[in-house]
Amino acid sequence: MSAPCVLVPRRSWPGHRFPAWAVAALRAAGAHVVDHEGARPRRWDATLLPAVLPAGAPPARGRTGQVIALLDAPPRPGDGLLRGADVVATSAALAAAWEGEEDARVVRPAVLPGTAAADAGPVMRVASVAPLHWSGGHEHAVAAVAALIRDGTRAELCVAGDGPARESILFTAFDLGIERAVSIAGGSEREAVQAADAVVVAAVEDRAWTGLLHAFACTVPAVASDLPTARELDGAQLVPPRDPAALAAALSALAGDPGLRAGLAARGRRAAVTDVEACGRALLGALAG
């Protein structure tokens, strides 16, 4: 049987949600993936689209092949939803939130294992990893690092990626007087994770938090908002959402206790999903119905 061809049209995905992990997994499983807006194949076997449709997204009607809907964000009243497709959810919590004609199957994102950078010294390097979108809660991470600095901990924050919340994050850092300690890196979440002493996912809405999975795979301790998907992954220290004080307390404890950092990092590594090929095969399982 020839390798299946899967189309992942970028213009159908908001920039902060394009599923690069799914593209990598499908390719690892032997699929041919077209993930750009250039020349398309004359025929393809499946199209991967978001189950929760962004405003202005083109409908799936008229496309060649099967449609796989990736549920990576919770549906809310008023959202456009992709109907009549095979739905793959990135967590059991998100699958439970889906109210479609068919149940959603669960495929947890997988990322490659990695190694964190060596401890650089007295400055605690914190990476805030989530899309630069209001749901990522980066402003709460900025406020937590500001609290650490006020309490005498030398700390700096790197926010990975790009997106619509970029200016809001920078303004929060300026407003709290720590703009020199906060940077927004244009690189990948993985690069930010590997350079960090601790990873923060200060999310305010449940989503597919691949940055958290990168922290687990790279053995970097992680602190995350207590949301269903993070709870399900069971590899991070959980704090209440929208609570910078609780986040700062968790980071302060990690900064002062190497043993605590090592223990939390080991817990995350046990929770890591790193078989990217198996993840791709599970995604392709939707093609078989």
Image (cartoon, rainbow, N blue to C red):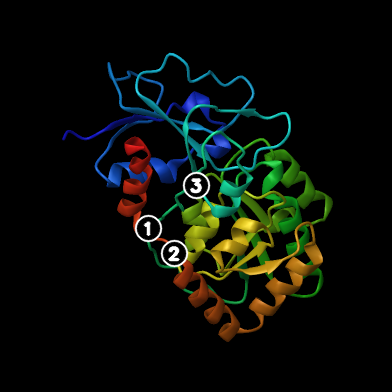
Query: What residue is disc 3 on?
Result: 187
Q: Earlier in the sequence, mark 1 or mark 2?
A: 1
Image quarter of residue 253: bottom right
The structure residue drawn at horizontal position 35% and vertical position 18%, both measured from the top left corner, is 64
In the image, taking residue 70 as reference, residue 137 lies left or right, namely right
Rounded to the nearest angstrom, the CA distance separating label 1 from label 2 is 7 Å
The structure residue drawn at horizontal position 47% and vertical position 28%, both measured from the top left corner, is 10
Q: How many marks?
A: 3
Marker disc for residue 217:
2
In the image, taking residue 81 as reference, residue 286 lies left or right, namely left
The quarter in which the N terminus is drawn is top left
Mark 1–mark 2 CB contact (< 8 Å): yes
Marker disc for residue 54:
none
Under circle 2, the secondary element is helix
Give the class, few, some or many, for how many residues have Cα within 10 Å of label 2's Cα (few <14, many ≥20). Answer: many
Marker disc for residue 112:
1
Front residue (pair 70, 219): 70
The quarter in which the C terminus is drawn is top left
- Toward the front, the furthest residue is 101
Q: Where is residue 275 drawn, in percent x and y?
A: 34, 58
In the image, taking residue 191 as reference, residue 243 lies left or right, namely right
Under circle 3, the secondary element is loop
Is residue 15 placed above or below 136 in the rendered structure? above
The structure residue drawn at horizontal position 69% and vertical position 49%, both measured from the top left corner, is 205
Q: Amino acid under label 2? A: Ala
Q: Earlier in the sequence, mark 2 or mark 3?
A: 3
Q: Where is residue 256 drawn, in percent x and y?
A: 66, 82
Is residue 44 placed above or below 201 in the rendered structure? above
Q: Is residue 127 visible?
A: no
Q: Amino acid under label 1? A: Leu
- Toward the top, the furthest residue is 62
